[in-house]
Image (spheres, rainbow, N blue to C red):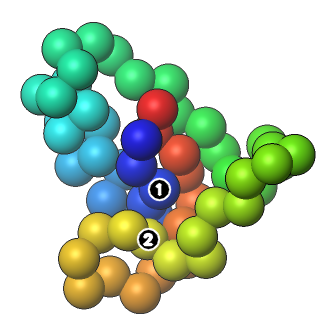
Amino acid sequence: MFVVCKDHVELAIDRFVDEYEDAPDVVDLKETHFKSWNPPPTCEEKGCTCEAKYLVV
């Protein structure tokens, strides 16, 4: 699972495919809310401080 900004979504998809050998689902965090999980406010990519917009799972 990766929480990333728009600039890093393709990289997260590539990582997911490499790790799990399957296509991920990409969830827009603006349109989806979770009851027991709050996404981090910023992209998880090292050194990036952009707003997290997508969940790659």
Which residue is the extreme one toward the front?
A: 36
Q: Secondary structure at mark 1?
A: strand
> What residue lies at 46% left-to-right and 81% top-to-bottom?
50
Locate residue 5, reporting x and y percent: 45, 64
Residue type at tag 1: Val
**Residue 45 appears in the picture as rendered:** yes
Q: Dot 1: within a 10 Å radius of its alpha carbon, few (fewer than 14), some, or many (20 or more) residues?
A: many
- Disc with the residue nearer the chain's start (2 vs 1): 1
Q: Foreground residue, 41 or 28?
A: 41
Q: Secondary structure at mark 2?
A: loop
Residue type at tag 2: Cys
> What residue lies at 47% left-to-right and 56% top-to-bottom?
3
Q: Quadrant of residue 52?
A: bottom right
> What residue lies at 38% left-to-right and 68% top-to-bottom?
44
Residue at which label 1 appears: 3
Marks 2 and 1 close (CB-CB < 8 Å): yes
Q: Foreground residue, 34 or 26?
A: 34
Q: Quarter of the image for the N terminus: give it.
A: top left
In the picture, measured across the screen, residue 14 lies left or right of residue 3, that is left
Residue at which label 2 appears: 43
> What residue lies at 46% left-to-right and 32% top-to-bottom?
57
In the picture, measured across the screen, residue 20 lies left or right of residue 28, that is left
Q: Quadrant of residue 16?
A: top left
**Residue 31 appears in the picture as rendered:** no
In the picture, measured across the screen, residue 52 lies left or right of residue 5, that is right
Locate residue 41, reporting x and y percent: 61, 76
